[in-house]
Image: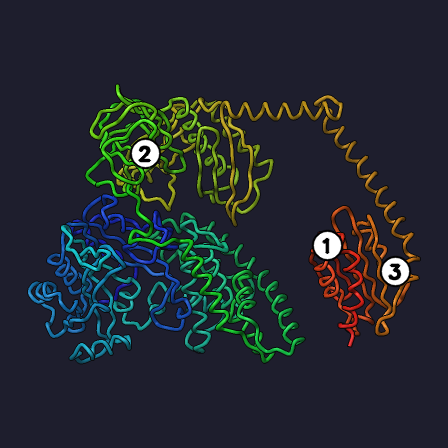
């Protein structure tokens, strides 16, 4: 058996199945499409579900892929075992109603024995207990040793997922030890010990399980196989763990070098090295697919993995940010197979660096909160931190549970783990509910998504806005029907349409559909899961029957406005890259007849100067009157032209390349104007951040841009009338008004201070002594926080030693201040605790240091009650 690198195994597999007439598809994005049951793609077949269920027509009946996957269900085992990982690659070959067991079993044997040259005496096969057909093929069409075939039960060799497609499977295993495995019981024991390693699962999808539990045979059975690339690489390289595989060990050695920790010297530190190695692979691929750190969904998964890796870097003694440095090695190992990694190299590094820095701040904040919890436990003579508080630290502040446990152990305390797990389970239930109950497809399948794959809907709307076609489907109230009448709302599907269906950020067309006996308004146009164009209509006249011919007419004026905005979006993208840099990539867009919205990767606010420069570039290009040319070509040809693509999109064998001279070249299926001059004027109306590393620009063109500028002109005119000056003098007049207001504010402040100072003698006359501590309290009116602080300082200085607590009513709000001298703090006085208690009475909150604290309240009628409570609080604090 010849050793093969991980990248070589991948290429050998894909090439082998290409030789068997399979179409090689690039890996789908880790972000699932039309599947609410998954946060992330976690299996090779997951993105292909619509092909298996018939909701979409596959580009070919035979497909092979290497799919990137992320699973976090066993995250606690990552680094502790030889095979658990959050990121992995899954090789697969798939048949959609084409070949079946007769072909796939001999091919599998051919690949592993003739291409990989695995020794036959080390190979074992398992089949489903009752699958005589598979046994017959294994024994007659391959030379596997029949003694190496074991029949196992449903738990081991039958694949099903609720209702829907399912079937028996056959697994292929590699036995690491010498000698032979004699019985099925012996085999299972060796598998549990990781000595017999399953590396390829051939799933024979031949049944459709209904809700009554019946297994109905499929007319066209499917093949779905999965081979874990990393696991296969361990066999080909003769190593025991995935962390010893060539590409992964290269990353691990880089972590080892950065930390100064040699792998193999310390088992505990080895766990940290493996966790960092695995997690940095995951986050690199997730970020390349557009996922960003956040507090929910897949962004939360990314944040958790990244922070867990950063935490283990601290355990190893690594100072500061380091994960972004390891990205270089990850991309070097995988960049050829996944070119998007190299394309987004700088962006990936920047996102990781920002999140690491943020985590450093989080750790410090979490420490402060945890120590306040510890103070509370010590005060109450308790030894166990509640699961609720530990989970809040973990979930809200990203503070690792193991760090909480470690710090508590130093204080001879512990966490209520059971309570923590209960909180974790509640969160999982909330997440599961948010993803909704699902079918095999991952969402509740609507009738419009079950339209037969035999029905084709051709889009001819690039060059036609009106045409006649036959009605093939009518849907009303989520049911297929044969006719639809005046006043009804429903959906119709025709053989051909000029209506653009919502896609790629561009909204769907509107218009009318009619014939001599019928008329309907098209309110929207979308695509179903199968990619068929569906028209959402309201019938305004007559009746429409299935198979009738209708005329479909797009609202030309609206389409023209949408097309202007779409072409302007491409020009905006190009201008942003010129002004801000090549790291700018589209992260989302929305285009309708009124405006365009463009989301893009960037790590700082776009300055007014940069906004102005972007506008100047777009408008200057508009005035050059470029023609907008659209060509159809293969994806490889498109890439050779330098056309930009969205990496989380799957493109067909033919793509449309939209070119505006050499200024902008992009892959795009949307509609565009013939000449950029039609845009007229381009104006940016807003720019803001919507997520870490993601900015959003909204802009208008043509008539809307003119309307926007006219509104601005009207506003300037109104301002000049209000402040009584000409438009050109507005700035000078506003500056003058601003100076006058500041002077008046200063004067008011001084008056308030005098007012407060006038109360000074009264406050000093009413100082009380509580447990040998002087306590000065007062209720004031219309004293702001600054004046309150100044007055507090004066009172504190005059009493020399003691506590000052003041409250002031301003309108419908309350301000509180507490100050204490150092000697009384030493006796137990804590201003932060005092202010927190009294603010609560007045419907507010706040806190602060032992010697000074401030707070606010919303209930001025409770002010006197709050200040009167100070005496009781002091008596409790001072022992």
Mark 2 or 1, nearer chain start: 2
Residue 375 shown left or right of residue 424 in the figure: right
Quarter of the image with the N terminus in it: bottom left
Q: In this view, does 10 lie above or below 466?
A: below
Q: Quadrant of residue 524?
A: top left
In the rendered image, the residue lying farthest to the left is 140
- Residue 569, given in percent of the width and then of the height, sits at 45, 33
Front-most of 788 and 171? 788
Q: Residue at x 53, y 26 (%)?
A: 705
Quarter of the image with the C terminus in it: bottom right
Q: Inspect this view and state whether residue 464 appears.
A: no
Mark 2 element type: strand
Rendered image: mark on residue 856: 1
Tell us which disc is closer to us: 2 or 3: 2
- Residue 326, given in percent of the width and then of the height, sits at 45, 60
Q: In which quarter of the image is residue 474?
A: top left
Mark 1 or 3, nearer chain start: 3
Tell us which disc is closer to us: 2 or 1: 2
Front-most of 742 and 277? 742
The Cα–Cα distance between marks 2 and 3, rounded to whole angstroms, is 76 Å
Q: Quadrant of residue 91?
A: bottom left
Front-most of 794 and 281? 794
Q: Mark 3 points at which residue?
A: 795
Neighbour class for label 2 at 10 Å: few (<14), some, many (≥20)?
many
Q: In this view, does 812 lie above or below 727?
A: below
Q: Mark 2 points at which residue?
A: 490
Residue 851 shown left or right of residue 69 in the figure: right
Circles 2 and 1: CB atoms closer than 8 Å: no
Q: Residue at x 75, y 58 (%)?
A: 854
Residue 352 shown left or right of residue 509 in the figure: right
């Amino acid at each position: 058996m010849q050793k093969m690198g991980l990248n070589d195994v991948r290429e050998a597999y894909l090439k082998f199945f290409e030789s068997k007439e399979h179409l090689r598809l690039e890996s789908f994005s880790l972000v699932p499409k039309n599947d609410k049951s998954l946060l992330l793609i976690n299996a090779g077949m997951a993105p292909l579900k619509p092909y298996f269920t018939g909701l979409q027509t596959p580009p070919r009946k035979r497909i092979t892929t290497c799919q990137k996957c992320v699973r976090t269900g066993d995250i606690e085992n990552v680094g502790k075992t030889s095979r658990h990982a959050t990121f992995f690659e899954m090789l697969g070959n798939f048949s959609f109603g084409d070949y079946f067991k007769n072909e796939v079993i001999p091919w599998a044997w051919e690949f592993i024995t003739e291409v990989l040259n695995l020794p036959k005496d080390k190979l074992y096969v398992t089949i489903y207990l009752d699958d005589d057909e598979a046994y017959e093929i294994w024994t007659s069409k391959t030379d596997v040793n029949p003694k190496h075939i074991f029949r196992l039960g449903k738990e081991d060799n039958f694949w099903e997922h609720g209702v829907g497609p399912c079937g028996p499977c056959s697994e292929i295993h590699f036995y690491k030890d010498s000698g032979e495995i004699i019985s099925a019981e012996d085999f299972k024991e060796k598998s549990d010990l990781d000595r017999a390693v399953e590396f390829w699962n051939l799933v024979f999808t031949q049944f459709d399980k209904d809700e009554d539990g019946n297994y109905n045979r499929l007319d066209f059975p499917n093949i779905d196989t999965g081979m874990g690339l990393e696991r296969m690489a361990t066999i080909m390289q003769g190593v025991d763990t995935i962390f010893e595989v060539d590409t992964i060990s290269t990353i691990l050695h880089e972590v080892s070098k950065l930390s100064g920790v040699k792998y193999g010297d310390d088992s505990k530190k080895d766990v940290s090295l493996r966790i960092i190695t695995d997690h940095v692979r995951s986050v690199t691929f997730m970020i390349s697919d557009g996922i960003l750190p956040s507090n929910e969904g897949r962004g939360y998964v990314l944040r958790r993995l990244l922070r867990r890796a950063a935490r283990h870097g601290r355990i190893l003694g690594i100072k500061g940010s380091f994960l972004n440095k390891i990205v270089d090695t990850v991309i070097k190992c995988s960049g050829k197979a996944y070119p998007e990694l190299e394309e987004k190299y700088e962006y990936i590094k920047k996102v990781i660096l920002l999140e690491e820095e943020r985590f450093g701040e989080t750790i410090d904040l979490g420490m402060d909160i945890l120590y306040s919890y510890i103070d509370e436990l010590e005060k109450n003579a308790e030894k166990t931190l509640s699961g609720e508080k530990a989970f809040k630290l973990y979930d809200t502040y990203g503070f690792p549970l193991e760090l909480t446990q470690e710090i508590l152990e130093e204080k001879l305390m512990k966490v209520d783990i059971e309570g923590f797990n209960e909180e974790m389970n509640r969160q999982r239930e909330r997440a599961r509910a948010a993803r909704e109950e699902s079918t095999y497809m991952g969402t509740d399948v609507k009738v419009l998504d079950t339209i037969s794959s035999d029905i084709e809907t051709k889009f001819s709307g690039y060059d036609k806005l009106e045409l006649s076609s036959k009605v093939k489907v009518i849907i009303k109230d989520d049911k297929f029907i044969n006719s639809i009448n005046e006043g009804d709302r429903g959906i119709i599907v025709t053989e051909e349409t000029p209506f653009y269906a919502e896609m790629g950020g561009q909204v769907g067309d509107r218009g009318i559909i009619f014939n001599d006996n019928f008329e309907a308004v098209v309110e929207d146009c979308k695509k179903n899961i199968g990619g068929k164009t569906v028209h959402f209509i309201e019938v305004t006249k007559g009746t429409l029957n299935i198979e009738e011919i209708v005329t479909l007419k797009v609202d030309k004026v609206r389409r023209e406005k949408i097309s202007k905005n779409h072409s302007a979006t491409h020009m905006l993208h190009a201008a942003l890259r010129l002004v801000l840099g090549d790291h700018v990539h589209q992260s989302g867009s929305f285009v309708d007849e009124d405006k365009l919205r463009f989301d893009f990767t960037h790590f700082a606010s776009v300055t007014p100067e940069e906004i102005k420069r972007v506008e100047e570039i777009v408008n200057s290009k508009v005035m050059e009157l470029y023609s907008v040319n659209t060509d159809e070509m293969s994806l490889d040809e498109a890439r050779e032209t330098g056309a930009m693509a969205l990496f989380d999109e799957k493109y067909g064998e033919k793509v449309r390349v939209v070119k505006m001279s050499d200024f902008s070249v992009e892959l795009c299926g949307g509609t565009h104007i013939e000449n950029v001059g039609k845009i007229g004027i381009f104006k940016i109306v807003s720019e803001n951040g919507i997520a870490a590393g993601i900015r959003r620009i909204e802009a208008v063109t043509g008539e809307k841009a003119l309307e926007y500028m006219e509104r601005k002109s009207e506003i300037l005119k109104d301002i000049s009338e209000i402040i009584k000056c000409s438009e050109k003098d507005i700035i000078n007049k506003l500056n003058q008004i601003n100076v006058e207001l500041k002077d008046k504010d200063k004067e008011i402040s001084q008056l308030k201070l005098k007012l407060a100072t006038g109360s000074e003698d009264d406050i000093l006359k009413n100082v009380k002594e509580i447990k040998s501590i002087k306590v000065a309290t007062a209720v004031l009116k219309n004293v702001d926080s600054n004046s309150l602080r100044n007055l507090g300082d004066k009172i504190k200085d005059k009493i020399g030693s003691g506590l000052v607590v003041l409250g002031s009513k301003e309108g419908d709000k309350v301000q509180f201040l507490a100050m204490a001298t150092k000697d009384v703090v030493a006796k137990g006085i804590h201003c932060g605790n005092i202010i927190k208690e009294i603010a609560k009475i007045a419907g507010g909150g706040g806190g602060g240091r032992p010697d000074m604290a401030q707070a606010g309240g919303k209930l001025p009628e409770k002010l006197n009650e709050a200040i009167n409570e100070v005496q009781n609080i002091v008596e409790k604090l001072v022992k």
